[in-house]
Amino acid sequence: MSSQTNDRKLEHVRIVQEDVHVDRRRRYFDEIRLKHRALPELSLDEIDTSVEFLGKRLSFPLLISSMTGGHHELLRKINRNLATAAEATGVAMAVGSQRVMFASPEAEDSFALRSVAPTALLFSNLGAVQLNYGFTVDDCRRAVDVVKADGLYLHLNPLQEAIQPEGDTNFAGLVDKIGDVVERLDVPVILKEVGAGFSEEDVRLAIQVGVRFIDVAGSGGTSWSRIEHHRQSETDSQDLGLLFQDWGIPTPVALRLLQPYTNEITLIASGGIRSGIDMVKAIVLGASLCGVASPFLAPAMESAEAVIALIERLRREFRTAMFVLGAPDVAYLKGNRALLLEEQ
Ligand SMILES: Cc1cc2nc3c(=O)[nH]c(=O)nc-3n(C[C@H](O)[C@H](O)[C@H](O)COP(=O)(O)O)c2cc1C
């Protein structure tokens, strides 16, 4: 099991690198138009892109979303480069699922990133369904301790597990177990999907058990269904992964569905966010932070500098969009429906 989980991590990285269609590039954010200002009445230099999240200041609201970790030099290098860049630029980072370190202790150091990111906002990650397969609150605590994380991501991936031949598909009775983790952990728990989105029904269940942070991780970007399709043998239900590759709630649609709950829930947007313009749109739709995953994979395999270059590109795009919306700071953007052209 330990080497299986480790091999799977490497395989995911390889598949995302080799099949360009794993990133569905659906560009759902393009359907949203914002109101341009010819008279922004601002100087570009004055624009404040920074935000505070869980008591830490970020240079702009970017999160490098959960990807990897494990007992292999490539996986260690990816996490080290991402964390070094997050620290240097003042953005947040989440590690990939830490399940692997419970079966294979040699994987632990790939998640111990405080040596290169002493102050960055860092998040741990585990699959929520593992709470139905023997994982305990103590295991969650251990995952957080290894990263010295500011919060724990619990991911929900029912579609991915259903397509995997070896998938953990018992999602019954999970909500109360998630509530138990929320109640007993010292750091905040963020529930996320992995690219299929959240509905209002999900959010209502989450709120009932005390969850206060949700990352919608909607569809439009990385498709786990397509990744799993590559991992199936001929004799398995080989087209299931392809059939479901565009399943899910597009990220901007999920944000709109959940906007009524933003008094009770802090929203994070991810899934198909590919530019600073997409980020601005996600914040206008109510998100507090924007997660980007697969575009960071290739730069992270290269160097921390390559990761920094992508972060700087996103920041410049973000700031430019703020300028031409007449937005002096991020608070001005947040949930500001008056900036949506189609709602005028
Ligand atoms: C190579 C790779 C590995 C991933 N591993 C995890 C993981 O271990 N845990 C998790 O919660 N999400 C994982 N994700 C999902 C991302 O965090 C994110 O939710 C999803 O990819 C959508 O973002 P994107 O379209 O910007 O890639 C992974 C994504 C990629 C590309």
Image (cartoon, rainbow, N blue to C red):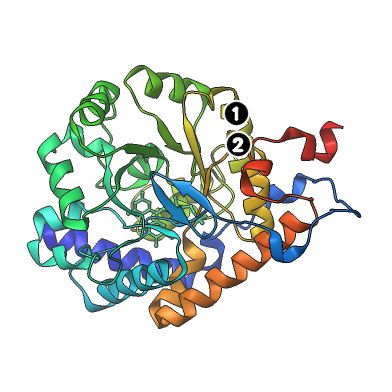
User: Disc 2 marks which amino acid?
Assistant: Gly
Q: Position of residue 218 (x, y in %)?
A: 53, 43
Q: Residues within 10 Å of mark 1 (few under 14, many from 20)?
A: some
Looking at the rendered structure, which numbered label has been put on residue 259? Answer: 1
Give amino acid for label 1: Gln
Task: Give ligand 1's quarter of the image.
Answer: bottom left
Residue occupying the far top of the picture = 208
Residue, far right: 38
Q: Residue at x 35, y 40 (%)?
A: 162
Instruction: Give residue 132's position: percent from left, percent from top.
Output: 19, 32
Relative horizontal placement of residue 137, taking residue 310 as reference (left or right): left
Helix, strand or loop status at disc 1: helix
The residue that mark 2 highlights is 286
Q: Mark 1 near ligand 1 (CB under 8 Å)?
A: no
Disc 1 and disc 2 in contact, CB within 8 angstroms: yes
Q: Quadrant of the N terminus?
A: bottom left
Q: How many marks?
A: 2
Q: CA distance from mark 1 to mark 2?
A: 6 Å
Mark 1 vs 2, N-terminal side? 1
Asked whether residue 31 appears in the rendered view, the answer is yes
Q: Nearer the viewer, residue 121 or 250?
A: 121
- SS at mark 2? loop
User: Is residue 239 among what the camera can see?
Assistant: no
Vertical placement of 258 versus 62: above or below? above
